Amino acid sequence: MKETVKKLAAYQAELPEEVVKAKYGLQHLARLSANESVYGPSPKVGEAVRAVSDDVLGYYPDGQATPLREAVADLTQVNPENLVFGVGADELIQLLTRTILTPESEMIVPDPTFGEYAIHAEIEQATTVKVPVNPADGHVDFEAMLAAITDQTTMIWLANPNNPTGVFEKTADIEAFLTQLPSTVTLVVDEAYYDFVDEPDATVAPLVSQYKNLVVLRTLSKAYGLANLRIGYGIMQDPLYTAMQAVRLPYNLSTYQIVGGTAAILDQDYLAKNVAAFQSERTKFQNFLRDEGLTFYESQANFIWIKVGKTKKVGQALLQSGYQVNDRLNSEWIRIALGTPDDNEGLKEAFLAALKN
């Protein structure tokens, strides 16, 4: 067994809702810890999945996810042969690190950012170099990222908006950074939350056709409300596309994932309605934090990163009040996902009470 794997700890998922409610005597629990969509998927997803005949169960699914591939290609205006599909973006993160990293290589990430990047680098026995974000506003320090590049650097990750900070980097800034990278360094821009961005030019996907060392990742788990169905995709050029298709397991998406994901992609009206609701709630909650004089980073995602001091104490108080947030990422900062309007209003009161305890 790899020594790096021996050191890994298993992911600790949240306890099931009913278990938490029973433990704390709660009638209602707002799950605001995993950045899920409280509005759920388009009703057309369930209709499409239920319409699948049981006859398909004895046969392997479409190994190229053809209808989903065509729907995503049409939506994103990219070549269908530039799309790699995975069981959530998580599988694509795993496959990219497996394909690109070696035990001698280095990978650069902002700090903080999504922890899975470093976990998979560790599995591949590569070194992760963490570059702190700007402490004042949470933006990526692109100059420091460039300075961190060595002859061993083969990969750089950029979640945009970043998770857990929610901070969004403009396309022009990312492209300026990209033009300064050696061609041997792959930049992966993880756009898991880009649907929530209310600024123009929210994605770098159109740049993939110009840069062979650029990869864009997307997921249907967040804005599309399909966290349970596990669907993600990557946009990339050859030679990485061909390599990723080779290391990807065949038939990795079931017929239900393909059909459900296609239905979600095709219902852009439903997506737009829910995104608008999240954006409105985000504005209200950030105005509340600002009025209360609390420190946070301006978010363009469906969650907010807030400085609270004793994170575990605040998180526990919120949980006992019926609000499950993420208090496991930092000892001083807490990540709160946006919920329904009613939950968000209740959370404001509970949050202030938790800070006073």
Image: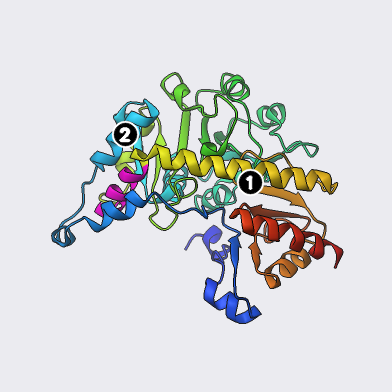
Going from N to C along the chain, the mark reached first, 1 or 2, is: 2
Compared with residue 344, is residue 276 higher up or lower down, i.e. above or below?
above
Compared with residue 52, is residue 29 higher up or lower down, i.e. above or below?
below
345 vs 48, left or right, is right
Q: Quadrant of the C terminus?
A: bottom right
**Image spot of residue 317 (x, y percent):** 75, 69
Residue 330 figure quarter = bottom right
Within 10 Å of the Cα at label 2, are there few (<14), some (14-19), or many (20+) other Cα atoms? some
Camera-nearest residue between 37 and 160: 37
**Secondary-structure class at tag 2:** helix
The residue range painted magenta reads 253-264
Mark drawn on residue 281: 1
**Image spot of residue 209 (x, y percent):** 41, 21
**Magenta stretch: residue 262 in it?**
yes
Give, as a three-letter code, the residue at label 2: Thr
Give, as a three-letter code, the residue at label 1: Glu
Residue 101 in sight: no
Q: Residue at x 52, y 46 (%)?
A: 103
Q: Which residue is drawn at 29% across and 30% down?
A: 81
Compared with residue 153, is residue 225 higher up or lower down, i.e. above or below?
below
- Main SS of the magenta part reads helix
Residue 29 in sight: yes
Compared with residue 268, is residue 295 higher up or lower down, i.e. above or below?
below
Reading the image, the residue beneath label 2 is 242
